[in-house]
Image (spheres, rainbow, N blue to C red):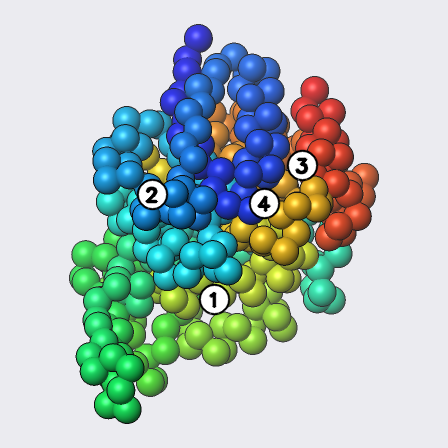
Amino acid sequence: MKSYKIALIPGDGIGVPVTEAAWEVLGKAARGAGFSLEGTTFPWSCDFYERTGKMMPADGIETLRSFDAILLGAVGWPARVPDAVSLHGLLLPIRKAFVQYANIRPHRLLPGVEGPLRAGAFDILCIRENTEGEYSGAGGRVHNGTDDEVAVETSIFTRKGVERILRFGFEEARRRRGKLASVTKSNAQKHSMVFWDEVTTRLAADYPDVTVTNYHIDAMAARMVMAPESLDVVVASNLFGDILTDLGAAIQGGLGFAASANINPDRTAPSMFEPVHGSAPDIAHLGIANPIAAIWSGAMMLEHLGEPSAAAAVMAAIEAATARGIGTEPGKHRTTEITAAVLAALA
């Protein structure tokens, strides 16, 4: 029997119960499809930081390198550990070390879910550059705590980084409906974003079957609200992609449905899969976290591992549950109830 080694990092808050739920569903799907998932859990989290002073051990990256994939719950507990510490101590180092340069987030309404828009027939795949751009971490502060304090944050855009994420987007558009939206702010950012636009134009010549449209970030935000059905694949920088995908989560009914994948397309290192919703410390003790985003992220993991039938079965089970109204409204059903409904549908 084929077996895959999966690193489980439940993390903080609701990351723990939704990871447990996703793992239960994925295990059943794997058994039904004739393969197995071997999970190893790592307690890296804000709790771990408070005990050790680190979000993960010094050898954490090398420890994860031997796994086929990583399933992450959520990271962060800002009342205890600053977000800048937790993010730069765990999530960003994993993305960068394993060259997970493509962050993929699907946005569509599941059966039975009512979004806030009049439009319902949209299917958007947002692809966010994931390792450089505005989140490169280049910069610093001087004259700290004085009236002359200066903070500098430098965005880094490399030709290699921009070209590979755009080419990834073109390939996805070719597999879908043949439309690519490239998002910048080149009217205001005349160096990095003009550069991005130029690379987009040059690569478009290699994909004559893909229709390319350039949007400014503000116009794209409006389009996602006013005409989401007009969009297919959307490609954006690290910051712009981060913002747009939270908007995408909102129009698909909320963060409880927002799945994501951090992909190493070259498969030289493990990819990581995680729900977008974060740790939500305010509801972590209530047992009402929606596990659908985590389960959907797990389905994306199965697809990436080369198990499309199992991935499709998981998605069908999610849709069967939401079609019955299970998990479609925040707080209406407990985490265990939603999980049980998905498991029951995964027959």
SS for dot 4: loop
- Residue at label 2? 52
Question: 276 above or below 71?
Answer: below
* Amino acid type shown at disc 4: Ile
Toward which corner of the image does residue 118 lie, by quadrant? bottom right
- Tag 3: Cα neighbours inside 10 Å, few (<14), some, or many (≥20)? many
Disc on the earlier residue, 2 or 1: 2
Q: Residue at x 60, y 65 (%)?
A: 228
Q: CA distance from mark 1 to mark 3?
A: 26 Å
32 or 172, which lies in front?
A: 32
Numbered tag placed on residue 318 in the rendering: 3
67 or 188, which lies in front?
A: 67
Residue 205 appears at what percent x and percent y? Answer: 27, 60
- Residue 268 horizontal side relative to residue 128, left or right: left
* Amino acid type shown at disc 3: Ile
Q: Is residue 78 visible?
A: yes
Disc on the earlier residue, 1 or 3: 1
Question: 227 above or below 26?
Answer: below
- Whether tag 4 and tag 3 are in contact, CB under 8 A, the answer is no
Quarter of the image for the C terminus: give it: top right
- Whether tag 3 and tag 2 are in contact, CB under 8 A, the answer is no
- Whether tag 2 and tag 1 are in contact, CB under 8 A, the answer is no
Numbered tag placed on residue 14 in the rendering: 4
Disc on the earlier residue, 3 or 2: 2
SS for dot 3: helix
Mark 4 against mark 3, which lies toward the viewer?
A: 4
SS for dot 2: helix
- Residue at label 1? 243
Q: Residue at x 69, y 39 (%)?
A: 335
